[in-house]
Image (spheres, helix red, strand yellow):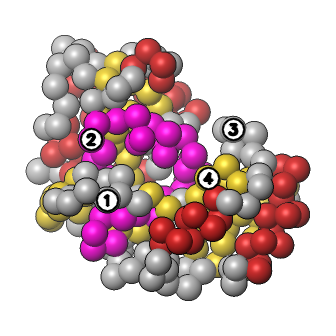
Amino acid sequence: MTIYERAMEFIADGDAVGLGSGRASAEFIKLLGARVKSGLHVRCVATSRSSDQLAASVGIPLVPLEEAMPLSLAVDGADEVAPNLDLIKGLGRALVREKIVASAARKVVILVGPGKEVPVLGAKGKLPVEVVPFALPLARRRLLDLGCVPVPDEQDGRLFVSDNGNHIIDCGIQPLHDPKAMETTIRAIPGVVGTGLFLGMAHVVLFGDESFNLLKEKQRTTDP
């Protein structure tokens, strides 16, 4: 069984489902589209334009978030998974919409392949932060004062613009032994829209091997 097939087992006919972004989410969307063609009834909300386009192309019905709340579940990927199932997400640049959809869901199922499990968040040294354009100079200075190494993301020589019309700063960080404090501090910077810290949000994490066959499943047993 793959992690995508296991994630499908959490979906019941008639559910409203949040669709994440990135490689793992794209494979899940393709499988969900095949199930829809076989008669499964769902309503879905995508976290990015790319996921929206993919879902539409495989026949998945899409609705605005307002029409779908509360979502039965959201299925997404992650860049880091800590032992308590806290996450760092956002290297695919959809972190704010992903966090909104995850917050609107009763259950959040995370799909990851090898190398995503870490002993402490920040082990890979990068935390994305989304910032409104006008605040970019201020946010860079404040993040630098926090000990981060803030590097605005650029693509083709221009600042990356998110689906929300904002910029992304990749913060070089040390392992976070108090991620809640870091989240609070960064979010207090005027103009910061959100960070890639997803704390206490994942209910289930499905870990796959190189072929994304299910290796293990971890569920959160305590409230955040």
**Does residue 105 belong to the magenta stretch?**
yes
Q: Dot 3 lies on which element?
A: loop
From the image, tell me which residue sits under label 2: 107
Query: x and y percent of residue 44 in the render?
Result: 38, 24
Q: Dot 2 lies on which element?
A: loop
Which one is in front, 87 or 53? 87
Please report the residue visible at 28 percent of the width from the left and 47 percent of the height from the top: 109
Mark 4, other Cα within 10 Å: few <14 / some 14–19 / many ≥20: many
**Which region of the structure is painted magenta?**
82-111
Query: Whole-Å distance between the Cαs marked 1 and 4?
Result: 19 Å
Q: Are marks 3 and 1 in contact (CB under 8 Å)?
A: no
Q: Is residue 16 above or below residue 221?
A: above
Query: Whole-Å distance between the Cαs marked 2 and 3?
Result: 24 Å
From the image, tell me which residue sits under label 3: 164
Q: Dot 1 lies on which element?
A: loop
Mark 2 vs 1, N-terminal side: 2
Please report the residue visible at 56 percent of the width from the left and 71 percent of the height from the top: 182
Instruction: Tell which tag, 4 or 3, sits nearer the viewer.
Output: 4
* Rendered image: mark on residue 224: 1
